[in-house]
Amino acid sequence: MKDLLPNITTQLDNVLQSLHYFVPELYLIALFVVVLVTDLLFGKRSAKMCRLVATGGVLLVILQVLNQQVTLPANTTIRLFNGILMLHHPAISFKLIIDVLALILLMFFTWDNKLKQHTKGLSDLYSIVTGSLLGLHVMTMAVNLLSIYLAIEMVSIASYLLAAYRSGNAKSTEAGLKYVLFGAAASAVMLYGISLLYSFTGTLDIFSSQMQQGLLHVSGISSAFATGLILLGIAFKISAVPVHFYVPDVYEGAATPVTAYLSTLPKIAGFALLVNFITPLIVLNTTSNWAAVNVRIVLSAAGIITMIAGNFAALWQNSVKRMLAYSGIGHTGFALMAVVTFSATGLSALTYYLFVYGLANIAALMMANYFENNEDITNISDYKGLGFKYPVISLGFVVVMISLTGIPISAGFTGKVLVFSAVYDVYQQTHNTWLMALMATGAVTTVVGLFYYIKIPLNLFLKRVEIVPNEIVKSTNLVVFSSIIALLLIIFGILPHLLTKLL
């Protein structure tokens, strides 16, 4: 017992010191509790009060994350809570992206007519989203197999609840059920991989020398199997092939603001987690000639197949949400290009690309939601001629489609240029054929993307039909916010340094 006391004291000191760097997450814990209490105290008025508390709280969290970005010295890595979490500038950048997009989404929830009319109201949504933000933050910093699994489960449970939130709606119920079944299978697979990796190495810390030595001394097939199972679990969160089949049905069945949440925040946190998890594996590949899993080949192959599967499947979709779901899979494959560079330039390109993709995707779903509110339409073919009836929102929709495609002067174009540049720089040094294959696939699928994204502007402005007059639902907030995002996508495309300085 006496021998353990010094160790316990050291661990307690580490926990107390870690709290100083865990302030944004402590704010999120407090915010979650306050939103729950607000829901209980204010009765029928609780939705408005919960929205006010949640948005105000997330703003405070953003300020705390920005403070971390400014005060943490460059190239500094801090291990928190005895090595369970790791704080560095890339993790802070991912947290900042997640929080900014979450702030937009919290306001978006109140502008969906079907959610507002639902018997459950909106209060529970704010509780679920604020609670999930803690899990998303932890995902960006997790470097311990236990913290990785717990963070993913926190986000997964929130996602299941959101997907099935409109319980009286058959599609929403189906979406929630499919998400739960696929998510449970992915969690089980990942947990099995974690248990195998722990049994091989005797440690949960993925950055420890014990983990690296354990992987070197176990058979290649065993270590490849264990790490492969964990990578499959992470692939589920980022919607990568081969665990992407749930995406179109879940995104289509969920409420539109929930689709905006599912298609952005868990995906961005998943990429942060992927970067953390593969970093020690890359070290093993390069320094110890560990050949059980060649991370670059595995991720390159996944990226190529994901780009092809997502973009070509999107070509045949008529539903706006299904088209955006498949295109989101394609964007996942493109973002994997930045990951496989294993460079600081690639990581910077990744954060920029994910942020502008998140903005554009949320704006696209806001605009789709506007047409759904006013015209009760969800298919692209039903947009014919509506560009002249709703000119402002339609022009914004065109700008967003331009950005998602990656056409010049948009932020999407700048993001793709940054990713291509990062990959090409590494290719010049390594002459790796997989990198060349990635660039070729990325270029071809970008052209393919033009053919399905252009269908929306084509129907809005170039296909004329007789417009039937109807009462226009006032959705001023949707028009203003989505138009502001569309404008930002142009500004960040022309002046990318405004964004890169923050990230």
Image: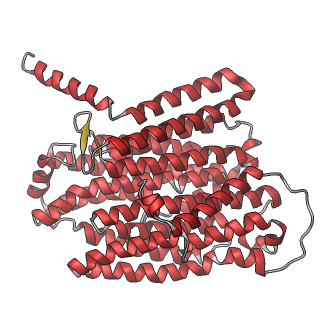
Decide: is 254 above or below 384. Answer: above
Q: Residue shown at 22%/48% (left/top)? A: 206
Please name the residue shown 21% across and 50% down the image.
197
Q: How many marks?
A: 0
Tell which residue pokes out farthest to the right in this image: 469
Examine the rendering and report whether any part of residue 190 can be seen.
no
Q: Position of residue 366 (x, y in %)?
A: 67, 57
Q: How is the image coloured?
A: secondary structure
The quarter holding residue 380 reads: bottom right
Q: Foreground: 92 or 433? A: 92
Instruction: Assign the C terminus to one quadrant of the image.
Output: bottom left
Vertical arrangement, residue 135 with respect to residue 221, above or below: above
Residue 114 in view in this figure: yes
Residue 263 location, x and y as percent?
A: 53, 57
User: Where's residue 182, x and y in %?
Assistant: 48, 54
Is 282 in front, or is 247? 282
Q: Quadrant of residue 465?
A: bottom right
| Image quadrant where one finds the N terminus | top left
Image check: 198 left or right of 244?
Answer: left
**Which residue: 52% across, 64% down?**
492
Residue nearest the observer in this picture, 181 or 482:
482
Q: Residue at x 62, y 66 (%)?
A: 322
